Image: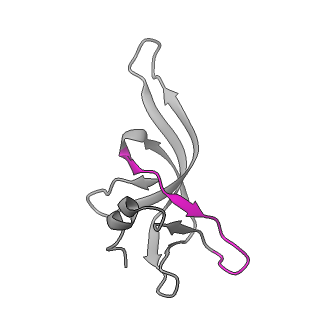
C-alpha cells in the first residue's frame, strides 16, 4: 500500500501482513489497524522505470486511515534482489508517483 506522507519524509510503501480491529476496553471505540513491512528507501530504477524498495523493511503497526491507495509490489527475483513498485498498472498511480526520483 501507499502510505500518507508525514511531516519529515516522503510517501512510504508497505506490504500488509495482517489487518485487525483493536479495542482498548470492551465497548470502547474500535481502532482499525494493520501490521506491515514498511520500506523507508525508494528510488526509481533508471533502466526499468520501476520504483525500487531498498533496504530492510521495518515492522510497524499502522492506522488504516494512513493508507492512501493500494499498490502492486513485485517481489524480488533471482536477477533483481529487491522488491519494486509497479506504478504502470493504471494512470492514477502513475501520476501520483511520477515525481519519485
Outermost residue toward the right in this view: 78
Q: How is the image coloured?
A: one colour
Decide: is 35 above or below 44. above
Horizontal side, residue 30 vs residue 80: left or right: left
Viewer can see residue 41:
yes
In the rendered image, residue 26, in percent from the top left (x then y), is placed at: 47, 13
Of 28 and 69, nearer the camera is 69
Residue at screen point 28% across, 62% down: 8
Outermost residue toward the bottom in this view: 47
Residue at screen point 43% across, 61% down: 90
Residue at screen point 48% across, 56% down: 71
Give the image quarter of residue 101. bottom left
Give the image quarter of residue 37. bottom right
Decide: is 88 above or below 22. below
In the rendered image, residue 24, in percent from the top left (x then y), is placed at: 45, 22
Looking at the image, how many numbered discs can be counted on the residues? Answer: 0
In the rendered image, residue 45, in percent from the top left (x then y), is placed at: 49, 82
Viewer can see residue 10:
no
Horizontal side, residue 16 vs residue 78: left or right: left
Decide: is 20 above or below 37. above
Of 42 and 9, nearer the camera is 42
Outermost residue toward the left in this view: 7
Residue at screen point 45% across, 44% down: 62
Horizontal side, residue 37 vs residue 28: left or right: right
Q: Is residue 71 magenta?
A: yes
Of 7 and 1, nearer the camera is 1
In the rendered image, residue 70, in percent from the top left (x then y), is placed at: 46, 51
Report the magenta residues as a range.
66-81
Give the image quarter of residue 96. bottom left
Amino acid at each position: 500500500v501507499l502510505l500518507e506522507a508525514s511531516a519529515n519524509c516522503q510517501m512510504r510503501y508497505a506490504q500488509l501482513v495482517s489487518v485487525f480491529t483493536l479495542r482498548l476496553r470492551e465497548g470502547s471505540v474500535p481502532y482499525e489497524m494493520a501490521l506491515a513491512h514498511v520500506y523507508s528507501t525508494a528510488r526509481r530504477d533508471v533502466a526499468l522505470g520501476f520504483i525500487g524498495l531498498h533496504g530492510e523493511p521495518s515492522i510497524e503497526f499502522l492506522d488504516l486511515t494512513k493508507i492512501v491507495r493500494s499498490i502492486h509490489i513485485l517481489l524480488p527475483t533471482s536477477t533483481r534482489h529487491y522488491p519494486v513498485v509497479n506504478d504502470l498498472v493504471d494512470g492514477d498511480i502513475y501520476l501520483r508517483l511520477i515525481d519519485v526520483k
